Image: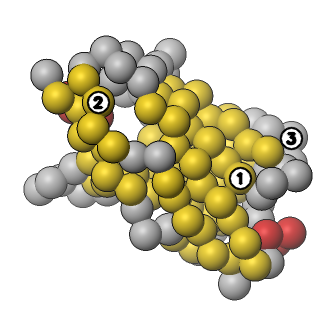
Amino acid sequence: QVQLVESGGGLVQAGGSLRLSCAASGRTFSSYIMGWFRQAPGKEREFVTAIRWSGGNTFYADSVKGRFTISRDNTKNTVYLQMNSLKPEDTAVYYCACGTTAGNGYDYWGQGTQVTVSS
């Protein structure tokens, strides 16, 4: 089992920045990839970004490229999401997720943290 706890959400004005954190505990050595997803009211959950624990390869949704940056601190078992130039359409609950096997999606999810961007 892997437990994930997100933090860092809040209310910010358009153009502002926020940094989300996702602290992993438990069988973290089994983690292959860590991702961030988001779900806005009335919409389906969507992929935002991901990073492989080993090698640090990163992946981004087109909607956030150039504005969001994912990073990891292996010593702290923590993944970060730096969000700059935020837009009202970035408003959503952001979820951290962990995948343990390549190509098998994500096995563990955090409880989510609310990000609200005002115009």
Asked if residue 37 lies left or right of residue 53, the reply is left
Check disc 1 and give the amino acid type: Thr
Q: Residues within 10 Å of mark 3 (few under 14, many from 20)?
A: few
Which residue in the protein does label 1 denote?
78
Q: CA distance from mark 1 to mark 2?
A: 23 Å
Secondary structure state at the residue bearing disc 3: loop
Return the disc, 1 or 2, that comes first in the chain's sequence: 2
Rendered location of residue 44, percent (x, y): 24, 57
Return the disc, 3 or 2, that comes first in the chain's sequence: 2
Q: CA distance from mark 3 to mark 2?
A: 32 Å
Q: Quadrant of the C terminus?
A: top left
Kindly indicate the quadrant of the structure image that contains residue 99.
bottom right
Q: Vertical placement of 77 versus 89: above or below?
A: below
Check disc 2 and give the amino acid type: Val
Question: What label does residue 25 carry, if any?
Answer: none
Which residue in the protein does label 3 denote?
55
- Residue shown at 62% from the left, 42% from the top: 80
Kindly indicate the quadrant of the structure image that contains residue 111.
bottom left
Check disc 3 and give the amino acid type: Gly
Rendered location of residue 39, percent (x, y): 29, 53
Q: Residues within 10 Å of mark 1 (few under 14, many from 20)?
A: some
- Viewer-side label of 3, 2: 2
Rendered location of residue 1, percent (x, y): 69, 84
Residue 8 visible within the image: yes
The answer to whether mark 3 and mark 2 are in CB contact below 8 A is no
Question: What label does residue 12 carry, if any?
Answer: 2
Q: CA distance from mark 1 to mark 3?
A: 15 Å
- Residue shown at 76% from the left, 65% from the top: 31
